[in-house]
Image (cartoon, helix red, strand yellow):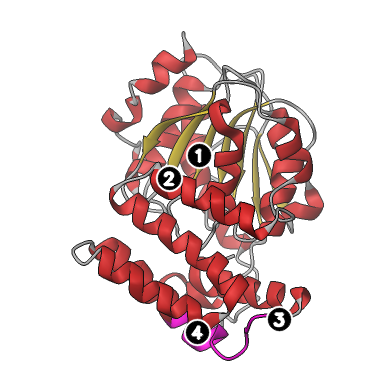
């Protein structure tokens, strides 16, 4: 099988998920889960790992494990590796934990995850805790699903520990948050990788799928992107904006707003959101993101952040905003 030719066909768009891979509470669309199922069933080679980074209650995990189970030949590769903090966050309470009045922010939901994925009798290892501290074993990776890149620090740790194990001409990266707006480190990283990555699929309001076509520049993986000069960050996000269209271009504009927030404070960032709203008056998805970010800035950051805020205080505020907005 020619890997790129296979991926370009986007076979996941014609696949039906098995019944036991659905019905698990998840933030992923059915198409995203069909993608993961297909990659595990038909694409992963068996001589490299499948990484499920940001599994929450098990929606992504179930899709991957079901794919491993349904392969035409038994899986001989390493266990699927799942990562999560497994801690309830405030933004998840109304939709995912409202039925249990005893659940509190910070509680563990590991038991629910285990119950949701116990039906799949295939190799699986679960890493509970901070992925920055846990890292990766160093073995080759075929499929890297990323739904944990909610801060600069986590993004750079994953670049350092996981990306060197991707295989040019073979590996696939599923960036679940590429189109999530307030996370500029993701498009910045992709832009720095240049021709090393080839975009295969951009799911509506969801995951972007990249094929690792060539070796990723070592300095991107070693140095990360958090320490880049702010002007360089702006330039790279601008490049991502120019390369995009439709709703993706709109959320790339929102990614730039995070840099405006970092440089100029929350009031200026709110003005930038107004600018974006005038550019996309008919795009309900972009406008919903604008409203979501605006609410987060007004409640978490408007009078806390200002130009010249100490980096440590800004980092703490950014983590709170990411958690409020995207579950980071």
Question: Mark 2 touching mark 3, by CB under 8 A?
Answer: no
Q: Which of marks 1 and 4 precedes in the sequence? A: 1
The verdict on residue 8 being magenta is no
SS type, badge 1: strand
SS type, badge 2: loop
Q: Nearer the viewer, residue 200 or 264?
A: 264
Q: Which of marks 2 and 4 precedes in the sequence? A: 2
Look at discs 2 and 3 and give the one toward the viewer: 3
Q: Which of marks 2 and 1 precedes in the sequence? A: 1
Alpha carbon of mark 3 to alpha carbon of mark 4: how far? Answer: 13 Å
Q: Nearer the viewer, residue 291 or 9?
A: 291
Label 3 neighbour load within 10 Å: few <14, some 14-19, many 20+: some
Stretch in magenta: 295-309
Residue behind mark 4: 267
- Label ID, residue 207: 2
Quarter of the image with the C terminus in it: bottom right
Alpha carbon of mark 1 to alpha carbon of mark 2: how far? Answer: 6 Å
Q: Is residue 79 above or below residue 97?
A: above
Q: Is residue 108 above or below residue 128?
A: below
The verdict on residue 306 being magenta is yes
SS type, badge 3: loop
Q: Residue at x 65, y 76 (%)?
A: 106
Look at discs 4 and 1 and give the one toward the viewer: 4
Visible in this render: residue 271?
yes
Q: Residue at x 39, y 73 (%)?
A: 273
Label 1 neighbour load within 10 Å: few <14, some 14-19, many 20+: many
Residue behind mark 1: 174
State the image coordinates of residue 2 (x, y, percent, origin top left). 46, 9
Q: Which of marks 3 and 2 precedes in the sequence? A: 2
């Amino acid at each position: 099988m020619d890997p790129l030719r296979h991926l370009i066909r986007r076979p996941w768009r014609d696949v039906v998920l098995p019944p036991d891979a659905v019905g698990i509470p998840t933030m992923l669309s059915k198409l995203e889960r069909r993608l993961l199922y297909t990659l595990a069933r038909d694409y992963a080679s068996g001589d490299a790992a499948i990484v499920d980074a940001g599994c929450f209650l098990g929606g992504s995990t179930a899709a991957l494990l079901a794919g491993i189970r349904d392969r035409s030949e038994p899986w001989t590769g390493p266990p699927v590796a799942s990562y999560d903090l497994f801690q309830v966050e405030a933004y998840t309470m109304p939709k995912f934990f409202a039925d249990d009045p005893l659940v509190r922010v910070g509680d563990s939901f590991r038991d629910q995850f285990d119950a949701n994925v116990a039906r799949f009798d295939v190799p699986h290892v679960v890493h509970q805790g901070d992925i920055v501290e846990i890292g990766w074993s160093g073995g080759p990776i075929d499929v890297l699903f990323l739904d944990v890149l909610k801060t600069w620090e986590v993004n750079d740790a994953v670049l350092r520990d996981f990306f060197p194990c991707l295989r040019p001409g073979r590996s696939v990266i599923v960036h679940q948050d590429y189109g999530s707006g307030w996370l500029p480190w993701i498009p910045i990283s992709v832009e720095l990788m240049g021709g090393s990555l080839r975009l295969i699929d951009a799911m509506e309001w969801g995951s972007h799928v990249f094929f690792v076509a060539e070796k990723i520049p070592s300095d991107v993986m070693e140095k990360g992107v958090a320490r880049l000069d702010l002007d360089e960050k702006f330039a790279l996000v601008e490049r991502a904006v120019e390369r995009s269209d439709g709703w993706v271009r709109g959320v790339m504009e929102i990614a730039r707003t995070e840099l405006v927030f970092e440089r100029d404070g929350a009031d200026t960032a709110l003005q930038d959101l107004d600018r974006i709203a005038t550019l996309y008056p008919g795009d309900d998805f972009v406008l919903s993101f604008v409203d979501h970010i605006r609410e987060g800035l007004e409640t978490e950051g408007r009078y806390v952040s200002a130009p010249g805020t100490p980096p440590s205080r800004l980092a703490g505020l950014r983590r709170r905003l990411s958690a409020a907005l995207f579950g980071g």
